[in-house]
Amino acid sequence: MDYHDPVLLQASIAGLEIIPDGIYVDVTFGGGGHSKELLKRLNKNGRLFAFDQDEDAKKNNLLDDRFVLIQGNFKFIKRFLRVYGVTKVNGILADLGVSSHQFDVPERGFSTRFDALLDMRMDSKSELSAYEVVNTYTEAKLKAILLEYGELNNAKAIAQAIVKARQETPIKTSFQLKEAISKFLPPIKQHKILAQLFQAIRIEVNQELEVLKAFLLQTTDLLVSDGKMSIISYHSLEDRLVKNFFKYGNFEGEPEKDFYGNINTPFKKPKKLIVPSYDEIKNNNRARSAKLRIVTKI
């Protein structure tokens, strides 16, 4: 299955400073590119657990005794790992982007390129799909997610247009959604606006920011002292959460200090932000907005 090349592969793996007999977790398995590279650095006693809630990812399972693929959402990382008797790990890796495979399969509804049913579920068993968001959310709630998750300046007007269109007939496909807001899509900005719109709906459908927060909060207990975490994000909403958590141990971006004025944080000072090289972006367009942050547990 075509999942394309993993982004920032070498840098994200190098940031984990792999211990050959350590225990590691790849919480976004996808096509398995990062996991394959990580396994190369483990000896026979090392272990790698990977997470992916997308059933398609099972087709990329790695036949290796040191590897376990868990079909589940990584917001339950501690619960799933306990099933395997694991309470501490040496490193955690996450590539938070939607996989190229999901974008390239029309019926998944992630892409603006195809006239597909509105879906966008990473877990096909989830009850909430893009159809429900577009057709049942109130105008106020639509405006809120378009503004917060899509950062669309004219979120109110777009929400109004969607509500008006669905009153005539349900909006079932991506092209129907495009048509409903067509007057807000000038040719020069059409691609960007649609990308922001689809991003907002996708984040809401999959509760991506809440999942990320739940996951990050568990990492402080999971990581051993000097354990490493590499996280690749693709838009400012995710990156801001990761940046604040790595720096302060919270999502507000405000340092918590003890009685003596010392900043309480579970991590050492984060390493410098890493972005893809010109050559990587040229060879893999998906990498253009990627940001890699690496941190070490105190």
Image (cartoon, grey):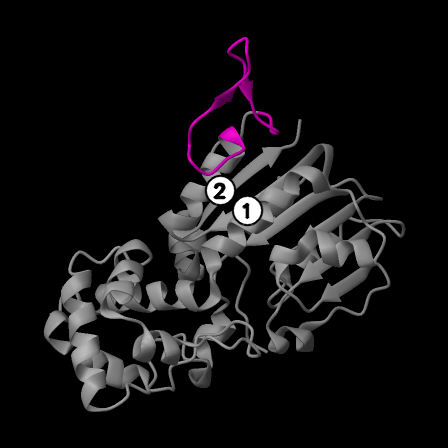
Residue at the spot 82% in from the left edge and 65% down from the top edge: 64
Percent across and percent down for residue 169 are 23, 91
Of residues 262 and 258, the one nearer the viewer is 258
Residue under the point 79% across and 46% down? 87
What is the quadrant of the N terminus in the image? bottom right
Residue 229: give x, y in percent of width and height: 62, 41
- Residue extending farthest top: 260
Whole-number angstrom distance, CA of label 1 to CA of label 2: 8 Å
Identify residue for label 2: 242
Residue 3 percent across, percent down from the top left: 55, 71
Q: Quadrant of residue 219?
A: top right
Horizontally, is 68 left or right of 92 in the view? right
Q: Is residue 87 visible?
A: yes
Q: Is residue 109 above or below residue 63?
A: below
Q: Are marks 1 and 2 in contact (CB under 8 Å)?
A: yes
Quarter of the rendering containing residue 265: top right
Between 166 and 239, the one lying in front of the other is 166
**Quarter occupied by the C terminus:** top right
Circle 2: residue type: Val
Kindly report which numbered mark, 1 or 2, lies closer to the viewer in this rendering: 2
Q: In the rendered image, is residue 34 in sight?
A: no
**Which segment is the magenta one?**
248-268
Q: Looking at the image, is 94 positioned above or below residue 195?
A: above
Q: Nearer the viewer, residue 40 or 66?
A: 66
Number of marks present in the image shown: 2
Q: What is the chief secondary structure element of the magenta stretch?
A: loop
Residue 141 position within the rendered picture, expressed as x and y whole percent measured from the top left? 29, 64
Mark 2 neighbour density, 10 Å: few (under 14) some (14–19) many (20 or more): many
Queried whether the magenta region covers residue 56, the answer comes back as: no
Q: Residue at x 42, y 28 (%)?
A: 254
Q: Is residue 260 magenta?
A: yes
